[in-house]
Amino acid sequence: MNIDIVEAVTQIAKERNIKREVLSEIIESLFLSMIKRKYGTTDNFEIFVNMDKGEVEIYQTKSIVKEVEDPVTEIALERAQEVEPDLEVGDEFIEIVDPTSFGRRLITSAKQGLTQKIREAEKEVLFNEFKDRVGEIIIGDVRQINREEILISVDNMEVLLKKQDQIYNERYHRGDNIRAVIKEVAQTSRGPEVLVSRTHPQFLVRLFELEVPEIYDGIIEIKNVARFPGDRAKVAVYSNDKRIDAVGACVGLKGVRIQSIVKELNNEKIDVINWSSEPEIFIQRALSPAKPNRIMINEEEKTALAIIPDDQISLAIGKGGQNRQLASRLTGYEITTEKESDWLAAQQPEEKLLLSDVKELSKNIYEKLAAAGYETADEILDAGQEEIAALKGFGAKTVQRIFDILNSYYEEETEENQRDDAGEEVGTEEES
């Protein structure tokens, strides 16, 4: 029986890549459990497992006594002397235990326990193997599809592709061949759990390494990656060899390299840009396909304002704001965009109404106001009627007239602006 068990275990070891030392420990613990169930103790038992010969030897140490009270730990003198005549009371006697004496039921139960322990050992082997492969791409077959996860068979191991790690617009079928990056390996109550991902930025990095030899060789570096999986991604690359164009190498002749990656990611649009240590240049490139006219950086707050030509503002922002968000993630700066026309308008100083331009004011009133230090209509209106009335030579009626004249100027300007805005709206409706 013991030879059959050892041979079976040895065969399993070869098939499942389990170390012989581990299997030897499993077999030893298996026989110890049988001993414990039969004799109630393992204290006076020793087990020797010889994997090369396929043998298991069990030795039971007993004390020699005249009258046996505990057959598990004691042996009668007469019986011991049948084996070795020179033995005396008080000596130790080593008895070889026949494994067949455990009985069929106990042996069957032990074999079942052996199978379970081998499974556990196999999982431990796989766990140790996969934990060193985090960040590596695996290829497997879809085995089972559930609502929250997909089970993929890889090298005799089932790995999990959870919903959040699936590209949202992909559809999977049982038996499909699938690639993913090993995201995490953890020990759980159910045993080792290997999580893989198709949405993780590292998956895109590994795909570039597979398709672009210069990246694998270290000539070109991927500095950063930002993704909206299934929709769009931006990849910043840098060449350590001035003779090699980083973007050109990644795209490939006629786009063959980048298209292979795009196809793997279900037509995810990928922008490859040259990395720069200068934030302004890097942000400008990251906002591609838009071409900002100016970038203003705030290093303390890690923010940037990009001034965009009016006809390119939608390109800079992108569908659902994706282009701007990806550029922010890629560069590490919170980027805001502004139309060039709006920015220029904000830079122009506000025109103020000079008192000298108000023809309705008499020369005498103007000179008195100027002598008091007032030059613009805003200054008069901000001061208020009481303050102006306190000036020498200004009565209440005169002050009221001054304010009526100045307020009428601003009212006319407001009405004119409203007419201009209305005209623009009508023109827009006619064009549409």
Image: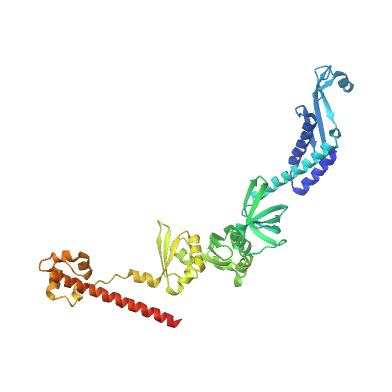
Confirm whether residue 16 shows in the render.
Answer: yes
Q: Residue at x 79, y 43 (%)?
A: 9
Quadrant of the rendered image containing residue 140: bottom right
Left or right, residue 97 beside residue 411:
right
Marks counted in the figure total: 0
Q: Nearer the viewer, residue 72 or 260?
A: 72
Specify how the rendered protein is coloured: rainbow
Instruction: Residue at the far left: name it.
Output: 393
Q: Residue 221's spot in the image, x, y percent?
A: 55, 60
Reply above or below: 69 against 195. Answer: above
Percent coordinates x, y for residue 392 in the rendering: 10, 66
Confirm whether residue 52 shows in the render: no
**Residue pictured at 39% horizontal, 78% vertical:** 425
The extreme right residue here reads: 82
User: Looking at the rendering, in which quadrant would you find the N terminus?
Assistant: top right
**Image x and y of residue 21, in percent:** 74, 40
Outermost front residue: 397
Left or right of 374? Residue 34 is right
Res. 300 image quadrant = bottom left
The correct choice, above or below, for 373 with respect to 128 in the image is below
Frontmost residue, 372 versus 52: 372
Res. 155 image quadrant: bottom right
Give whichever of 274, 36 is nearer the camera: 36
Residue at the bottom extreme of this rendering: 430
Left or right: 82 in relation to 258: right
Q: Nearer the viewer, residue 164 or 90?
A: 164
Residue 128 in the image: x percent, y percent?
A: 67, 47
